[in-house]
Image (cartoon, helix red, strand yellow):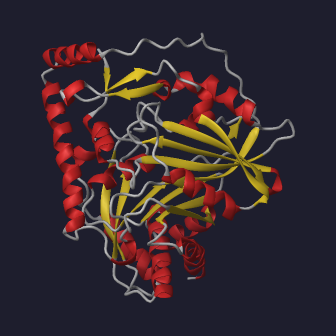
Amino acid sequence: MPDRLSAADAALLALEDPATPRHVGSVAVFRRPRSGFDYPGLVALVERRLPLAPHYRQRVAAVPGRLARPVWVDDPDFDVTHHVRRSALPRPGGDEQLFDLVARLMARPLDRSRPLWEAYLVEGLAGGRVALVTKSHQALVDGVRTVDFATVLLDGTPGAVEEPDEPWTPRTPPGAVRLLTDAVTDTLRSPAELVENARATVTDVVAAGARVADALGLRPSGPLRASGGRARRFAVARARLGDLRDIRAAHGGTVNDVVLAVVAGALRGWLRTRGEPLTAVRALVPVAVSDTPSADARLVDLPVAEPDPLARLRRVSAAMRGRGGVPAAVLRGMGGLHSLGARTAAWGRGAGLVVTNVPGPQAPLYAGRARMTEVFPVMPLTRGHALAVGVTSYDGGVYFGLTADRASVSDVDVLAGELGESVAELVKA
């Protein structure tokens, strides 16, 4: 039986256009070890780990006439060096140059004729550092069967070595007749396929509905509405996890509540620098459900008009305890909150931005012998949205990644600075 894309994954491909590429990514910064961490070493590491993520050597094949959802097929021309690339900053490269490069890389759609991922080793950073920038299409990363490849590359111990696998031989991709035959066979074996194919067709209507929503003004307005251009900006902020935990311990709620209160305070400060009205900003916030690979998502009004930082925190906590959000059918079977947040945003209505917060490991991770010192999520922008916020914690730090429409939020670095001010404001309170 062919490995057919789910209705949700097929929808993500249908929703994509050149101005709104649907890939998620990350920027991981490493301390270069004495033994070195170079491009050949990264390529070798990727090749060793590819068996852990089979879809990373497969491409999407459409069924003729769209009589069924597309399938994953082996790429007979797979070349790991096409996907793992290298770049360098003028020495000594700083964060500003790195994040300018990230914005350019993330603005480019992935090549659909190849496996839907790329990784870039960025050299030339000051302080003997290197960065790994990854991007994977959301149809590829569901957080359950397939995870972001950056996760597969990391280990809890430096220099972990695994036994080499047997050489990979791609299977011959099916032709048009085989694709049609398999589609009919799948439907006969599983009548549920008819429902799934119908759902995939409905998602085309959803994509058209998103464009109608733009025309009717049902998307964000003011500074959070995208210009429709392809250019991006990317900025980051950092905080100490201990500070956020102290705030939670003193005032209740969860660390996620504190993160949202920090974002609300930062939006307040940023809007004031622009002279914009201080009205509530509705955020779509994915929330993990217990310890299972499922999730829910809440629509939360961030109280940016509230001047008291503790009152903002209390209001966010109350909102997060409430009910409501994205229909469960949209979220079922999806894990990995960063990918989930981007997925749910595609169907979200009335949200001004997406905020995802993913707790990460609190012990060091390594790519080969290179220790990862910090990592920033890179979220895609949904049609009509000018800003997306990804947050993750790692090894005692909290890392904010801000993806912005370049024309609408050219001052995203100001917003990033306000995040630090918002944390300090809560700590002082």
Residue at left offset 40%, top offset 80%: 304
Give the position of the N terminus as an image quadrant: top left
* Coordinates of residue 290 in the picture (x, y in percent): 38, 46
259 or 353, nearer to the observer: 353
**Which quadrant would residue 211 be assigned to in this image?**
bottom left
Placement of the C terminus among the 4 image quadrants: bottom right
Q: Tell me the quarter of the picture where residue 225 sits.
A: bottom left
Q: Residue at x 47, y 85 (%)?
A: 274
Residue 427 visible in the displayed image? yes
Q: Is residue 50 left or right of residue 278?
A: right
Q: List x then y, in percent, for residue 206.
A: 20, 50
Image location (x, y in percent) of residue 335: 39, 41
Q: Is residue 238 above or below residue 91?
A: below
- Residue at 45% from the left image edge and 25% from the top image edge: 58
Q: Is residue 127 above or below residue 277?
A: above
Between residues 329 and 118, which one lies in front from this camera angle? 118
Please indicate whether residue 375 sits to the left or right of residue 35 in the image. left
Q: Could you say where residue 388 lies in the image, as x and y percent from the top left? A: 44, 62
Question: Where on the picture, by quarter, is residue 103?
Answer: bottom right
* 11, above or below 426, in the image: above
